[in-house]
Image (spheres, rainbow, N blue to C red):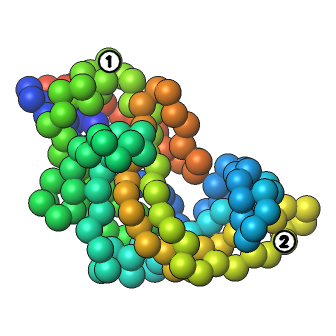
Amino acid sequence: MNIDIRADSVRITGYVNAVERLSKPIRETLHGRIQTFFERIKAGVFRKALKRNKVLVLLNHNAERVLASTDDGSAILEEDNIGLKADITITDQEVVQKARDGKLSGWSFGFVANDDEITAEGENQIRTVTDLELIEVSILDETKSPAYYGTSIESREGGARM
């Protein structure tokens, strides 16, 4: 995650998710029972999902904190050969201040799986999501932790790295 702090806004760019890579262990209900598993998003899944619906950008998955949207152009989302790439401009002053204070911790995303495959790799159960409805992308602050590895924070204000 790259953060470019401006006078009254913040531009956040980077990868929300790298496709074909495993998440951290997840413990939740999967196919009717609570279990621990790793998850990965199959390549091409985000591309298909982005054609179907608009996506909101939220703070910490809070539907009452809409920061941007693909519908109004304040959020640009696309899947490339690495994964789901985001370019988001946020004017919410609380989020701008959190960026200044170094309190943004990463990305996350909310989705509904339309189809998945469950396999075993050694002792680990793997869920590969093969189709989804992408509902939202979230900017996470210091109170939350991303489910996927690989999110880093780089902040720049006035061209200098913080």
Structural crowding at the residue carrying mark 1, measured as other residues with C-alpha within 10 Å and reported as few (<14), some (14–19) or many (≥20): few
Q: Quadrant of residue 49?
A: bottom left
Q: Is residue 3 above or below residue 115?
A: above
Q: Is residue 28 visible?
A: yes
Q: Is residue 161 above or below residue 67?
A: above
Q: Is residue 80 visible?
A: no
For numbered disc 2, what is the local secondary structure? strand
Q: Quadrant of residue 20?
A: bottom right
Say which amino acid is labelled 1.
Asp
Q: Mark on residue 154?
A: none
The residue where tag 1 is placed is 101
| Residue 39: % across, % down | 66, 62
Q: Quadrant of residue 145?
A: top right
Of mark 1 and mark 2, the one earlier in the sequence is 1
Compared across the picture, whether 144 is left or right of 74 comes to right
For numbered disc 1, what is the local secondary structure? loop
| Pick the front one: 45 or 35 | 35
- The image quadrant where one finds the C terminus is top left
The residue where tag 2 is placed is 120
| Pick the front one: 3 or 135 | 135
Structural crowding at the residue carrying mark 2, measured as other residues with C-alpha within 10 Å and reported as few (<14), some (14–19) or many (≥20): few
